[in-house]
Amino acid sequence: MAIKILDWVFENSKAQGIERLILLVIADHCNADGENAFPRVSVIARRANVSERTVRRRINDLVALGELKVVQREGRSSIYKIVVPGLDNGQESPEPEQEEPKPKNKKATRERNPIWDALLNSCDVNPDKVNSSEKTRYGKLVKVLKEIDATPEEIFARAATYRYKFPKATLTPTALVNRWSECDPSRVEMNGLKNVVPQGWNAIKAAREQREVSTTKAKGELNVG
């Protein structure tokens, strides 16, 4: 337990309600620098008296808020780091000294894709439990996000914005990508521009077409004269 990290959450965190409670539970597992916390989701859910689904969703919101960093680990619980100004050095948390047992199956696995994990986790989809059809569909979405240089942090932030703007809609990976432009956190209050920017897949298509038109026009102007 790190008392000063708990004190920081109590005195300075912008999180409220369940999010604040979950952050306090994580803080209770941190070291003095707010790092190396790796409680299982089930443990956080039990201590916060909420469901595991709620824990996953609220953790994504805390990441979007900028007060929590998450390092995903295959087959083991994630490592959490509370972002405390003055203590955060911008580096990822090191592996804890006492490692949890590794899976007995030692078959070679592909390197984890942070964009894949962020997209699915932000929509409460377990990346390790998708079928072949879902992998194909989600793979296309990941390709689109890579093409527009999306980052895991941006994905979590836009997922949180989606829930804010469409509280009655179900957030899915496809829905998030299709409404990507609408879920820009910096444009949440700019309702008047809602239909100005093409959305999701159309945004990329429109950008490509615009570049092609501009190039053709430029060549035409050079040929005149």
Image (cartoon, helix red, strand yellow):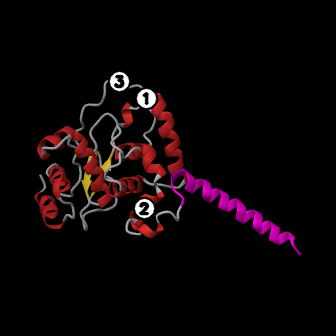
Q: Report the side of 81 relative to 47 (left or right).
A: right
Q: Which sits earlier in the primary sequence, circle 1 or circle 3?
A: 3
User: Few, some or many C-alpha atoms within 10 Å of disc 1 (few <14, some 14-19, many ≥20)?
Assistant: few
- In the picture of the structure, the residue carrying the numbered disc 2 is 184
In the rendered image, the quadrant that contains the C terminus is: bottom right
Q: Is residue 203 magenta?
A: yes
Residue 34 percent across, percent down from the top left: 21, 56
Disc 1, disc 3: CB below 8 Å? Answer: no
Q: Which sits earlier in the primary sequence, circle 3 or circle 2?
A: 3
Quadrant housing residue 65: bottom left
Evaluate whether residue 58 shows in this view: yes
Q: Amino acid at mark 1?
A: Asn
Q: Which sits earlier in the primary sequence, circle 1 or circle 2?
A: 1
Real-space Cα distance between discs 1 and 3?
20 Å
Real-space Cα distance between discs 3 and 2?
41 Å
- In the picture of the structure, the residue carrying the numbered disc 3 is 105
Q: Report the side of 125 relative to 175 (left or right).
A: left
Check residue 131 in the rendering and tell me which mark sits there, or answer none: 1
* Stretch of the chain drawn in magenta: 198-225
